[in-house]
Amino acid sequence: MPERVAVVGFGVTRFAARHPDATYFELAFDATKEALSDAGLTPNDIDAVVYGVYNDLFERQFMQDVLIHDYLGLYGKPGVRVTTGGSTGGYAFREAYLTVASGLHDIVLCIGAEKCADCFDYVVGKPTPEVVKAIAYSADMTYEFPSGMYAASSYALLARAHMDKYGTTEEQAAKVSVKNHKNAMLNPIAQSPMELTVEEVMKSRMIAYPFKMLDCCLYTEGAAALVLATEKKAKKITDNPVWVKGVGAANDKAFTGFRSTSDKLGKYGDIADLRSHYAAAEAAYRMAGLTDPIRQLDLAEIHDAFSFTELQAYEAMRFCPPGGAGKFIDEGIPEREGELPCTVSGGLIGCGHAVGATGIMQTGEVVMQLREEAGKKQVPIKRGNGLVHSIGGPGSCYCTVAVLGKDKEKERK
Amino acid sequence: MPERVAVVGFGVTRFAARHPDATYFELAFDATKEALSDAGLTPNDIDAVVYGVYNDLFERQFMQDVLIHDYLGLYGKPGVRVTTGGSTGGYAFREAYLTVASGLHDIVLCIGAEKCADCFDYVVGKPTPEVVKAIAYSADMTYEFPSGMYAASSYALLARAHMDKYGTTEEQAAKVSVKNHKNAMLNPIAQSPMELTVEEVMKSRMIAYPFKMLDCCLYTEGAAALVLATEKKAKKITDNPVWVKGVGAANDKAFTGFRSTSDKLGKYGDIADLRSHYAAAEAAYRMAGLTDPIRQLDLAEIHDAFSFTELQAYEAMRFCPPGGAGKFIDEGIPEREGELPCTVSGGLIGCGHAVGATGIMQTGEVVMQLREEAGKKQVPIKRGNGLVHSIGGPGSCYCTVAVLGKDKEKERK
């Protein structure tokens, strides 16, 4: 059995379209300083670091991680970089968990940071070829890229499949956008807090059917950091630890999977149902001993790269049966006031998507909520458990799920 | 204490300047098939995967890892990509170790793969701007790149500092090149097996003083894979397990470190002595309980990106005192027939540097040697321990060290 691991500190910068005055290592510094301060620790207390950094081309700088390591003065300590597309933050958190759970290191820092605005041409207000290229390289360059399958268009196909199979509507997806933009209004770090109507989302500019502009997440700069510790250390550091109860991860094939042997054999089911999401949730629930997530979780942070993606995640996380996501949002269950508030940070749509930092920011959101220190965003904590879902890659092929929780008897206030 | 972890399988492709008939995922497939076959396992037995892939730009394809995952049909299993420059393979192995040691997964595959030749212009026989750019992005783009500090030139400065401080000579470094090219002659997968003289190395084309062409490692394509398992599983899988006795890792600042607070305070010592290498070795030795490496190791695989780098590593690995590396090679200690054979695979200079795969290939070399199944390359195994050293990044700032070993009493033949 793995050693018990707790999250004992969290820090995050503002998520913004641009941080004109800060480099990525300065952003990482700010988030780390806040996380260490939250834990009451100094850089000397850190035994190892896991970095989540997505895109080398955004800054035309590989190995941003080691430059951050340098900037933080963490000489002589291990520091490893994880990169798995949009799920980079989620996988970095998992590696940080494993590093502590292994018994090799007691206190591990997990940092995600991203700068991308320097790739943009702010004069014309549109992404330049450089940033388009930087993101397009994430598609399968042999089959998908030549077919025009960039991020939005490949996720749009998954959404279309869901509409066809289950009758999910664009209006139901728009409700996710309305909810997450609204949730962002209570989040002081959010990039895009807005009061919207379903109609406004429906009327926004078409990007890739069925996605309109307001169904899509944002290009964002920012950083987030978490401090993880062994049970022994955690109990010395804080009287309000949040435990990592379950971590699950699963990769599926790239979207088209043209080269997959199992596809040739007809084993792949249906792109309406995201297999890696189901598998990652199952693994996390098994480890955490959760059997009825909708009744055992207080909140869930979902990786809402697109509005439809959050709907599909409701099903994969077993908040509702396959095909039940439209009804789930219609009934208001994932609203702030609903039975299972989802993406109360505002998510990628409302708070922003600073890729390597996103999963870490969303994990930190669940940590602060479970500590009941989430400020105006706070939702009621009755069950003591929260979930973080993180995805990435062509056709959403990477997925990580983490279940965090309090020891109910001992630690609930 | 971490759970005991063993290496139970190894596979590697040919290391070659070009694999014109194979994609990187086909190379990864070949290495994985061999590693699984070596362990007597099937893909279904794998619980999780760690990928080492260095450069997204070589193939203009991000997330090569998930395309490999797809190609191998490992749906529903976790797969994370690690990337830390030249030490990518070394850090990937460390993450695979942590994944098993955590108790979360029993059998973990560690795969490294690299293609780069498509970046080259084979008509003129020189790297095209694309590959130069792809590698140059690994330098610090703010300070180092504009100063012309690419891989060879920054490592050359470290070598010059060593020459100045300790009187190390170009001829002593050339002996490393002669040794490793010669070692490669016994390695069937090697890219550059050659019988050379010190004079020939000295006369080869100047690259960045003191490095001549034959002091430098190669651009290489290839893949390597290892299977790691818990003690319980390992004992079922094989009667010849090789244990991971120690893993150490440490990052230093980027070479110039202009932005480092501690440098401004004058804390940085001397670039002749590679701090991260010393720190990584110390951590690995502490964990493995090694106190006298030169008498407790049977062999060491050193990351000889450049001939001088291997010399500097002898000191950091404590095979000799600081400044003693020149004498160490003059006395023939690291030769195949010497007291501590170093880099018997041929290393990056003789076997090749398929970046993400290199550390995994060198770890596999130590595994096969300790199993006494290294074929013509076999060196005597009397003490039952071997070391793997892996480095990367601007100014060699990343370093990992692993100590592998047999249980002497029980498992030595």
Image (tube, coloured by chain):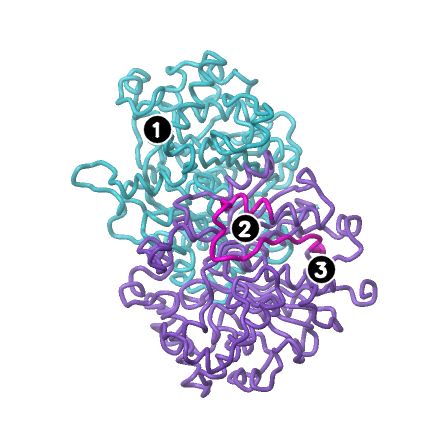
Chain colours: A purple, B cyan
* Nearer to the camera, A87 or B116: A87
* Nearer to the camera, B174 or A119: A119
* Nearer to the camera, A26 or B8: A26
Pointer 2 indicates a residue of which chain? B
Pointer 1 indicates a residue of which chain? B
Q: How far apart are labels 3 and 1 at the CA level?
A: 48 Å
Depicted A375 relative to depicted B27: above or below: below
Disc ID at residue B228: 2
Disc ID at residue A71: none
Residue found 65% across the figure and 41% down from its top: A47
Q: Is residue A348 visible?
A: yes
Residue B117 spot, x, y in % from top left: 27, 44
- Image side of residue A52 versus residue B203, left or right: right
Pointer 3 indicates a residue of which chain? A
Dot 2 amino acid type: Leu
- Numbered range of the magenta stretch: A3-30
- Image side of residue A324 versus residue A59, left or right: right
Depicted B99 relative to depicted B159: above or below: below
Snapshot quadrant of residue A123: bottom left
Snapshot quadrant of residue B127: top left
The secondary structure type at the circle numbered 3 is strand
Q: Nearer the viewer, mark 3 or mark 1?
A: 3
Disc ID at residue A243: 3
